[in-house]
Amino acid sequence: MPSLPQSANLKSIKAGIVGFRGYSGLELQRILGRHARVEPWLLEHRQDAAAEVHPVGRPGPPRIPATAEAASQAGLSVVFLATPPEVSLELAPGLLARGIRVVDLSGAFRLRTVDNYAAWYKEKHTEPALLAEAVYGLPEFYRELVPAARLLSNPGCYPTAANLAIRPLVKAGVVDLDRGIVCDAKSGVSGAGRKASLKTSFCEVTENFSAYSILNHRHVPEVLMHSGLDEADFSFTAHLLPVDRGILETIYFRAKGIESVEELAGVYQKAYAHEPFVRLYAPGVTPDLAGVNRTNYCDIGVSFDAKTGRAVVVSAIDNLVKGAAGQAVQNMNLMLGVPETEGLL
């Protein structure tokens, strides 16, 4: 696909957002609002949407119906689908047929095969050709595939933090896979989306901490596909934190062929030396949510006990930015040939 020249006029790219009222959609509005080259448009999909209140004289971005015809007439170059999988499956084909590129933030196009999708999402996939075509948009791993993509499948939040931490270790051969990897993952409540539910209501969440989707979380296959692990090697448990945003994953394994924490940290230094959105901590120092929230960074810290071979990696991201909207904009930048960090730093 042709890309825009680096000298493209400011605000020359029109980008649409479907699902702009959700947490990821609101984050997309915030990021694109400060993007030097993008004019955001809001695509209205819900017919029953309540009237919104705006400051006087500031109505916000232009709004059009969430149809391929309206998006084409408006001259949109790309549309973000911050929507449930069934809505993405409904809208993506028409947009692509009009030559509009799509960045999908749902799980609709992440799992590569209809069998995988049916197994983990408990639904039949209605667009198998697009599922096979979609590029998985984790730039640190697949940057060379992103620019030519028509359909970009934005990674899930938990898999982003997990894969950035695990894949370099597996690739370097420093994990004793016979003893497995444990990923203890914790997320803020916004990861469940904006739709009201008892589980995410204030009284259920505040002063509480809970595990969920044990042994069958739908993000597990994303980790397996992109980390190089088999399901038998990997134990993953998600937890709900009583905070609004952020993901912190503590990953436990037994290292092999490693003699010091500095050597283990060197695996990440080699993998991410030139990555703008992966930050590494000094050996033995761990990141936290406060350091990454409202940023597009993934922060990684490692600890290691040479006597026993026990290793612990902590990976932290903002689930709404690097785990959703920020990574989506990072991918859009790559797709359209503008600087990868535009709007994100």
Image: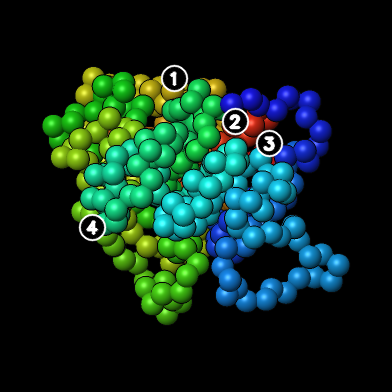
- Would you identify the image quadrant in which residue 242 lies? bottom left
Q: State whether residue 2 appears in this view.
A: yes
Could you tell which of marks 1 and 3 lies nearer the N-terminus? 1
Other residues around mark 4 within 10 Å, as few (<14) / some (14–19) / many (≥20): few
Residue reaching furthest to the bottom = 203
Alpha carbon separation for disc pair 1 and 3: 25 Å
Q: Secondary structure at mark 1?
A: helix
- Would you identify the image quadrant in which residue 56 lies? bottom right
Disc 4 marks which amino acid? Answer: Ile
Left or right: residue 144 versus residue 124 is right
Residue reaching furthest to the right = 57
Which of discs 1 and 3 lies nearer the camera? The answer is 3
Q: Are marks 2 and 4 in contact (CB under 8 Å)?
A: no
Q: Position of residue 205 (x, y in %)?
A: 41, 72
The quadrant of the rendering that contains the N terminus is top right
Q: Are marks 4 and 3 in contact (CB under 8 Å)?
A: no
Q: Is residue 108 above or below residue 277?
A: below
Could you tell which of marks 2 and 1 lies nearer the N-terminus? 1
Which of discs 1 and 4 lies nearer the camera? The answer is 4
User: Which residue matches tag 4?
Assistant: 214
User: Which residue matches tag 2?
Assistant: 334
Which of discs 2 and 4 lies nearer the camera? The answer is 2
- Residue 270: which numbered mark, if any? 1
Q: Secondary structure at mark 2?
A: helix
- Would you identify the image quadrant in which residue 221 lies? top left
